Image (cartoon, coloured by chain):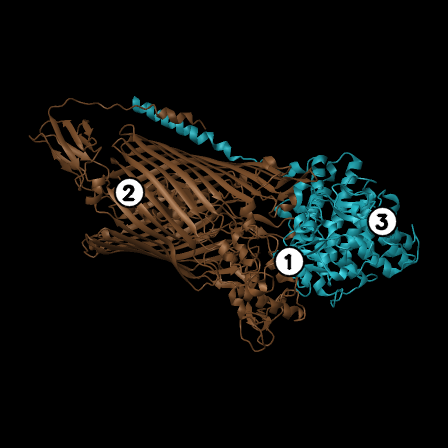
Chain colours: A brown, B cyan
Amino acid sequence: MKIKNYFLLGLFFISTIVMAQERQVTGTLTDSDGLPLIGVNIIIENTSRGTQSDFDGNYSIMASQGEVLVYSFVGFSTVRRTVGTESTINVQLLPDETLDEVIVVGYGTQSKRKVTDNIASISSDQINNIPVSNMQSSLVGKAAGVQITQINGKVEGGVKMRIRGIASISSSQEPLYVIDGMPLINDDESTTVAPINPLISLNPNDIESIEILKDASSAAIYGARGTNGVVLITTKSGRAGKTKVSVNTSTGWSRATNKLEWLNAEEYIELFTEASTNSYGAEDTWLTEEGGYFDFMANGLDWRNGAVDTDWQDYALVDGAVQDHTVSISGGDAKTLFFLSGGYNRTEAIVRGNDLERYSIRTNIDHNVSDKFKVGFNAGASKTQISRIGTDNSFSTPLQAVAQSPLSPAFLENGIPNNDSTIYYNFLMQAYNGDWDADIFRVLLNSYLQYQILPSLSFRTELGYDNNNQTEEYFSGSLTQSASTNGYADANAVQSDKYNISNYFNYNTTFNQDFDLDVVVGMNFEESARKNQFVAGTGFPSDDLQTVASASEITSGTSTRTKYNFLSYFGRATFSLYDKYLFKGSLRYDGSSRFGADNRYGFFPAASAGWIISEEDFLKDSGTLSLLKLRGSWGETGNAGIGNFASLGLFGGRAYNQRSALAPVQLANPELKWEKTQQVDIGLDFGFLNNRISGEVDYYIKKTNDLLLNQPIPGTSGFTSITRNVGSLTNRGFEFVLNTRNVSTEDFTWNTNFNLSTLDNEVTSLPGGDIVQGLNIVREGETISSFYIVEYAGVDPANGNALFYRNTLNADGTRDRTTTSSYGQAERVIMGSPYPELMAGFTNNLTFMNFDLSFTFQGEWGASLYNSGGKFQSGNARYEDNQTRDQLNRWQNPGDITNVPQARMYQTNGQQDSSRYLEESDFIRLRNLTFGYTLPLSVTERFKVDRLRVYFTGVNLLTFTDYSGYDPESTYDDLGNSNIQRGITFYSAPPAKTFTIGLNIEL
Amino acid sequence: MKKYLNFKLLFSFLAIGFIACDDNLDVEPEQNLSPEVATESPANIKTILNNIYGEARQGVSYGGGIGMAAELLANAGDLSWNGTFVQPGEYNEKALLADNSFVRDIWLNAYEINNQANIVLENLDVFDDEDDRATTEGEAKFLRGLAYFDLVRLFAKPYVAGQANTQLAVPIILDAVLDASVITYPARNTVDEVYALVINDLTDAYEMLPESNGYFADKYTAQALLARVYLQRGEFAKARDAANDVIENSGAELAASFADAFNNNENSSEDLLAMQVTSQDASGNSWNLYWAGRDFGGRVGNPDVSILEPHYAKYDDENDDRANFFYTTSRGVATTKWQYQFGNIPVIRLAEMYLIRAEANERLGTEVGATPLEDINMLRARANASLYTSVNLETILMERQRELAFEGFALFDAKRLGRNIGDISFNDDRLVLPIPLREMDANPNLVQNPGY
């Protein structure tokens, strides 16, 4: 690719000719508040003479009597004045109320009124000031049909965004993120199975708007990657006029949304002594005797007299803190617009030892070289530093401390974490004698050149570059779990980069007012490359020397390179007739290196139509109905979220005793092709009473065929799975959006947005049969990832045995509902799914005088959550682990009616995976609440401040749920990247409840 | 004119954009070879063969997984499971579930070994050198035989000598799988069929392998494994002769002291087969992980498998080095056999051959190679234990327990000797591993073992 050619375009030179003039006309241009408007274009109609207003809003131009001055400014109504005899013409420009709301679509923008697709549009004021460190979490509850869940309470944790359900079983379920036209790198580069959110490096305060392309017709322009929806992020740009300085600064603290109740020392002694008695008889006093196990735990402290009672949960879940500061400067004139920002975020998690710091800058510049030729450059750079902690399935992760006995002190007398007498490795040692940091450097560059070839034809070329550079360094010292090797350290570095070139023409014409045609035709090439280096070593001379350089032995090292490409051609035509009949068609032709040579390219067509019924004569004059639009769309999208070489048979390098070895690692499947999704969407947009009440109703059916499926195969083949195009699944749902302006007076306004969506996911065909992974199943006729487990039947009152329903199939198709205490005789059945069937968001914005209040409630219903740690945490004292307090309600005597079986130490009694640990996870959450006060302008003016607002914001302030575990949304980060094993929690930290106080200053 | 120029520039630029990128869709993997390249030369085939040893060394099987299954399933009080993992706990409780992932991994790993052996065996025609070819074939067959021998011992009801053994064992797959079109959904073969394959493979290996072959399998490695197989089947004469062949001809010698036989960076003089472990593959040593104290690389159970009082009663001389081959930790007693995290893992030691020869000679009333008393005293002398003046079958089997404790023999000895484990009969369903649930889910032609 000869990038140099771009710069040839920079040589374009368009001259402007200034003609002679007759008389000087001067004046001042102001807005409705009387503030000067800078950079307003003033031209004399039908000539090429013109000027602009200066920094004080003043202008002067030579004009002759009778000529017409045209004052135009972006966002304002154009004003015409005929020059008379006066020499001063002052004009007040008013905001253009007739301007249609414009939304961003792939490769262009469109008037919202004419959109025939389902696109959720979220503006910056809905997401700014929400003190979350990642962009996605600020969107929760704001868009119908979009589920956004952060895996758990670790600050860097991955975020799942699921748009209109789950459209794939084995390939990516993540939407495509596009920032200012550039598809983003969205690969988790964590060195562990616990994902790091790849978008953590974006500063949410730099975002102007987010458009979520939900239906196929809007997403199909992104063809092979549109199936999971597309999230278009537009960063802020300057506005012509006075240079604006904004400061947003906030600071606050956070704590866990929920803590659980655990046994204290006295209760622990009681329950475990009983459990041991039940297993070994009262005469076996191995726990309580002098020198017994409790003495070991207490490490010399007098546990018999209450000298030790450690609350391990309090060591794990701590108070967090957040700080966010963003300063931006923006402005410009008619030729150049700019936006500069710098941001700093520090988030200390509610889990000990986990925090994040992010520094970011952004520069966006748009420049009109001439009235035909426009260039722009957006650059964002950020550095994110994360202090990491172990995955949920590691003893070094804080929350696993809840398993420790309350009889074990957390620290020794010398202040060093107690690792001598804890049941498990003490996580506090990790902070004391270890370190784990991730650094992410991210650079995003976008540039464009746009040339207006003809009034109706423009050409735009975009060059984007995304670089994600991530390093992780880990050290664990001689007192940690790496004691046997006298310390361990590793370092991992990943360099991912992607460049993206798009060239497209846009043809836009109107024939005699009635017929609007807009055509986009172009191509896109994208190359993504990734390099990775890793080295690890053991044996350190001192715990103060923590880099691999000091290791006595290098024990592991690797480096890899890989890349993939996309080459695409696309076209889209939109036309409207009489402003009420709307049509759109698009086609994308995508090729990817990821597919076999025979199936490399795929076609992705889409079409949609709309009818603005309210424009028809019979409704046009209706006083109550302001908008009624019926729309329908159909489209086909793809999913290419599979491995880079998934169709090839592969051997990979290994070693045995430091001699090279070759292992078969992947079976060949040259027939592998695109996974395709067809989606139909029918929608109705409505508005009543001058749009005081407006909304949308949509119903969609989304069918995915030729699923790219990692199909399990018999292990007797030497392999466990193969990627095949088999099976299909369907998502269907109903989406309802209602926006109302309840009160709209000068002093008091109250707006409400409500959205509700349903989701029905069904696997419709799975020729290879069930796929069972852990406790989740993919089965024909069921929701993907449904729970597939043995059904718990409570406790036998006679003997305290755990009971299970047999659930074996009877001849007549019913299930045997008799119970058994023998787990092996009980059959697994489908019990619920990890995905909600109903989601809703409810946002209110109120202003009263100078006060403003906004809050969002969000709820999900119909999902279940399985606690994989339940067998240890709430397992009637089977293991030595401390228990949740509800285990005190165990069976003790014949006739006891309870759900907790008899406590039997080291003997299994109900701890097997069963519905005992499965719970519905419905919840409603006060997701965020902001209360602000803006000082009157008359006060702030004295300090040359245009706006000064103080505010309080809270996140996750209230949660209403019957779920008894840590949190209905927290899941197991070891499975963070699993598509099938969903809805599992395992010592997963709850999210943070955050309180901040902030200040907005605009100069 | 200017406008024309602009167009020209624009279109020429676009043309570059459209054409220049087309070839870029061909991207080759940089970390992987295609199957064609991987199997095209003798050097590559031998590299695949080398990987089979690497597969076998994995923690889930010969790195300790199989041994732990055999020891914990046969545990009737000598051991306690202190670890946090549920799966070995199920072995210890004799309450296995079909979804036990340790069991699953033993199965999957065995068939990885099998498939890679099959790949090697199907591509032998690339060899020009006959010796090279024979050695490669012999090693592949040895490794395949080893894998099936442990599969049949773990996943099927015990072999009963002197009758047809038609009880179900595991599927036999002899065709290499390298692409999707050759995946099969096999049913289980019988115990007799699997043993026939094992004996056939090991006999071939014995014929083909050289007298010595570094730390890879040689002629006597195959013979030693055959001795173990025959003993398991109660074919004492064959077991005796095979063991005798190894003792007399392999050149292996008992290590100078008992301690010298373990925790070695290089194979000891008595190792007939040992899995090679270096500091670069710590995870390959599950023996260490579960049986060593925390300070030596073991897991949090410290040690996960702790040795209990009843075991010490097996030693009849307090000066016996083996009776003192333990160390205490804060939470129990660990065997010293697996103390070194990066030590090689003995799979077949010469000591076992002396025990097989002694037992077989005793049972048959023969003195091939040496008398049972001589063989037993040989081991006792090495361990500084007092020498016996006479032995019988019982003392020989007792000596076997002392010598081979915690090396993965307990379950298989119990089954061949018909010894119950606590109150669980030696042929109880609970002592047979379940066909892994994922395998049952993926292959409709498999029949589950009774009791699961």
Label of residue B382 in the image: 3
- B220, above or below B40, in the image: below
Question: On the image, which quarter does residue A670 sit in?
Answer: top right
Amino acid, disc 1? Gln
Question: On the image, which quarter does residue A293 sit in?
Answer: bottom right
Q: State whether residue B440 appears in this view.
A: no
Dot 2 alpha-carbon crowd within 10 angstroms: few under 14, some 14 to 19, many 20 or more:
some
Secondary-structure class at tag 1: helix
Label 1 close to label 2 by CB (< 8 Å):
no
Q: Is residue B259 left or right of residue A140?
A: right
- Which residue lies under the disc numbered 2? A1001
Q: What's the chain of the residue with tag 3?
A: B
Judged by depth in the image, the label closer to the viewer, 3 or 1, is 3
Picture coordinates of residue B104 (x, y %)? 65, 55
Secondary-structure class at tag 3: helix
Distance in Å between CA atoms under marks 3 and 1: 37 Å
Amino acid, disc 3? Arg
Q: What's the chain of the residue with tag 1?
A: B
Q: Is residue A430 left or right of residue B393?
A: left
- Which residue lies under the disc numbered 1? B87
Amino acid, disc 2? Ile
Q: State whether residue B429 appears in this view.
A: yes
Which of disc 1 and disc 3 is earlier in sequence? Answer: 1
- A408, above or below A466, in the image: below
Dot 3 alpha-carbon crowd within 10 angstroms: few under 14, some 14 to 19, many 20 or more:
some
Distance in Å between CA atoms under marks 2 and 3: 86 Å
Picture coordinates of residue A449 (x, y %)? 35, 31
Dot 1 alpha-carbon crowd within 10 angstroms: few under 14, some 14 to 19, many 20 or more:
some
Residue closest to the eye, A221 or B209: B209
